[in-house]
Amino acid sequence: MSPKSFPARTVLALATLLALPAMAQSHDDHAAHQAAPVDHSKMDHSTMEHPKMDHSRMDPSLHAPTQSPREPIPALTDADRAAAFPPIDHGAMQHAPAINSLLRVNRLEQWDGGHGNGQAWEASGWIGGDINRLWLRSEGERRDGRTVSSDLELFHGRSISPWWDLLVGVKQDFRPADSRTWAALGIQGMAPYKFETSATLYAGSGGQLMAKAEVEYEVLLTNRLILQPMLEATLATRDEPGHGIGRGLNKVETGLRLRYEFSRRFAPYIGIAHERLFGDTADYSRLDGDHARDTRWVAGVRMWF
C-alpha cells in the first residue's frame, strides 16, 4: 500500500502516539527539578546578573516559614518579675571584714655548714586594712645549740602605691651583744619584673646608721615546684667592735632554695646558702673564734596562716 493512500487523520494520530513518551519524560524532569532542593553554596553568584533578574515574578511563598511556633510565648507578668528578682535582705548579707591579718614564716630551716650546724628563721606578719597595717618581722639564728642572733621589728605600714608599702617603726636586737633599740624607716614591695624587695634604714645610739636590703625572686618550674634565689646585704656607717660591726659593707648572704607547695600554706624546701663577712666585721668575727665565710646546705619549710 502506498503511503499516499493513508488518510491525513491517520498520519496525525500516529505522530501523536509516537511523541507521548518524550512529552511524559520532559514533564517528569520538570517536576523533579522543582521538587529537588537547590544547593546555593555551589552556585557562582559572581556570574549572575542581578540587575536583569525579574524579582517581581518570584514566588514570595518560597521564603515564607514552613510552620508557625507550636506554642506562643506567654506574656511577662509581675509574678515572673518577682520570682526573677526577689527582695534583698540586707541584714543577712555578709561583707568582708575591714580588718585582715596574715602570718608568714618565710624560712624555718635546719642548716649544716663547713663550720658547724644550727637552725635559722625568718617570719613576718601584719594586721590591718588595705591602706594602713601593723607589721611584725623577726629573724634569727642558732649555732651549735646557742642563739647567736635574734631581733624583733614593729612597724606602721602605709600603702603608697598598689605595689609598695612605706614602713616606720622600731627594731629590737637581742643578740649577739647586749640588747639594742633602733629607729627604723623602710620600704617593701614588688619591684618591676616581680622582684620581691625590701630596704630598711636603722638609726641606733651613738650616731650609728645601718642599712639592710633584700631581694628575692620566684621562678615557677611548675605550678607547685618553685626555685627561689635570694640576695641580702648589710652596711654600716661606723665601727663598733663591741657589737662586732665594721664600717662599710659588712655582710652579704646569697641563697638558692627549691620548694614544693603541697598547698599555698605549706611548702617544704631544700637549698644552699653562702654567707660572707667583709672588712672589720670579718676581723671581729675571727677574733671571736668564728669564720668570715661559710657555705651551708639547708632544709626547711615555708608556711603561712
Image (cartoon, grey):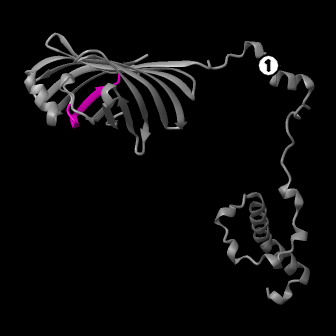
Residue 142, image x, y percentages: 20, 15
* Residue 114 appears in the rendering: no
Q: Amino acid at mark 1?
A: Ile
Q: How many marks?
A: 1
Is the magenta region chiefly helix, strand or loop?
Answer: strand
Position of residue 270 measured from the top left corner of the image (x, y, whole percent)? 22, 25
- Left of 289 or right of it: where is 3? right
SS under mark 1 = loop
Q: Quadrant of residue 171?
A: top left
Residue at the location (86% across, 22% down)? 82
Which residue occupies 13% across, 29% down?
A: 295
Q: Magenta stretch containing residue 292, yes or no?
A: no
Q: Residue at x 71, y 16 (%)?
A: 93
Q: Which quadrant of the figure contains the N terminus?
A: bottom right
Question: Dot 1, crowdedness within 10 Å: few (<14), some or many (≥20)?
Answer: few
Place residue 12 in its image quadrant: bottom right
The answer to which of 175 and 159 lies nearer the viewer is: 175
Image vertical order of residue 133 relative to residue 69, above or below: above
Hey, which residue is sitting farthest front in the picture? 206
Q: From the viewer's perspective, is 178 left or right of 291?
A: right
Question: Along the line of sight, which residue is nearer the eye, 142 or 31?
Answer: 142
| Range of residues picked out in magenta | 246-262
The structure residue drawn at horizontal position 46% and vertical position 30%, both measured from the top left corner, is: 167
The residue carrying mark 1 is 88
Residue pushed farthest top?
A: 145
Q: Nearer the viewer, residue 89 or 38?
A: 89
- Figure quadrant of the C terminus: top left
The image quarter containing residue 147 is: top left
Q: Position of residue 290 (x, y in %)?
A: 10, 23
Q: Position of residue 15 (x, y in %)?
A: 82, 77
Whether 294 is drawn above or below 12: the answer is: above
Viewer can see residue 255: yes
